Image (spheres, helix red, strand yellow):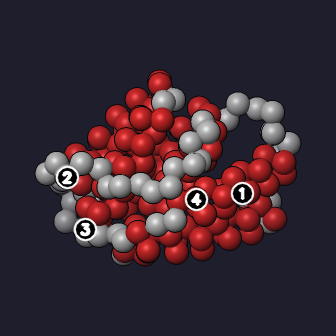
Amino acid sequence: MNTITLFKMQKALDSHIESHHQIENEDLFDRKVLALLVEIGELANETRCFKFWSVKPSSEIDVILEEFVDGVHFILSLGIECGFDDVESIMQGASIEIDTTGQFLAIYNCVQKFRNSRSRESYLELFQGYMKLAQLLGLSEDQIEQAYIAKNEVNYDRQQKGY
């Protein structure tokens, strides 16, 4: 996955949104953190990994991929916010045997750790943990990159239509 290209695309989208909504000088960090947490929850809901009371299967892979990419948008945006947009590649998180539910919980912890420290180390840990989740969900880096590019276009279109 070419993270430098994705960072550039996200930076342009962020700039467009901030200009369009006249919020260029606002501190958006906490709002982006909350948006990321919401997106992670929406992804978990689509996987249904925690719904032990239900026999309904998870959503189709394309729905899961789209929800996953929504999280990528905010992870990239937070990296840009903190000056970490020079990260050239993201390795998958540590290969500790963990199930999907456990990985979601680990990611929530990573988000809070990053929010509190805003350190490069905690940012990389968050991004790596998210990529480990992708692996658990059966998503490839190529699928993620292609879906990100497609969703980026949708996000521009939404801005033009007053989303």
Q: Is residue 30 left or right of residue 97?
A: right
- At 21% from the left and 60% from the top, the residue drawn is 54
User: Disc 4 marks which amino acid?
Assistant: Ile
* Residue that numbered label 1 is attached to: 13
80 to 6, vertically: above or below: above
Task: Indicate which disc residue 56 carries.
Answer: 3
Percent position of residue 53, x then y: 18, 54
43 or 51, which lies in front?
43
Label 4 to label 3: alpha-carbon separation: 38 Å
Residue designated by label 4: 4
Please state the horizontal and vertical placement of residue 22, each as a whole percent of the image.
Answer: 85, 42
Percent across and percent down for residue 49 are 25, 57
Residue drawn at the location 78% of the way across and 46% of the way down: 18
Looking at marks 1 and 3 on the same chain, the residue that comes earlier in the sequence is marked by 1
Instruction: Find residue 136 and name its label.
Output: none
Task: Residue at 66% x, 61% y: name it.
Answer: 9
Specify which label sits upstream in the sequence, 2 or 4. 4
Dot 2: within a 10 Å radius of its alpha carbon, few (fewer than 14), some, or many (20 or more) residues? few
| Residue 139 in picture, x, y percent from top left | 35, 69
Secondary structure under the numbered disc 3 in the rendered image: loop
User: Does the residue at mark 2 contact the one at mark 4 (Cβ under 8 Å)?
Assistant: no
Q: Are marks 3 and 2 in contact (CB under 8 Å)?
A: no
Residue at image coords 53%, 59%? 3
Identified by mark 1, the residue type is: Leu
Identity of the amino acid at label 2? Ser
Q: Which residue is identified by label 2?
A: 95
* Spatial separation of the CA atoms under disc 2 and disc 4: 25 Å
Q: Which circle's residue, 4 or 3, is located before the other in the chain?
A: 4
Kindly state the secondary structure of the residue where label 1 is placed: helix
With respect to residue 160, does 94 lie above or below? above
The answer to which of marks 2 and 1 sits earlier in the sequence is: 1
Q: Give 60 or 110, whichever is nearer the viewer.
A: 110
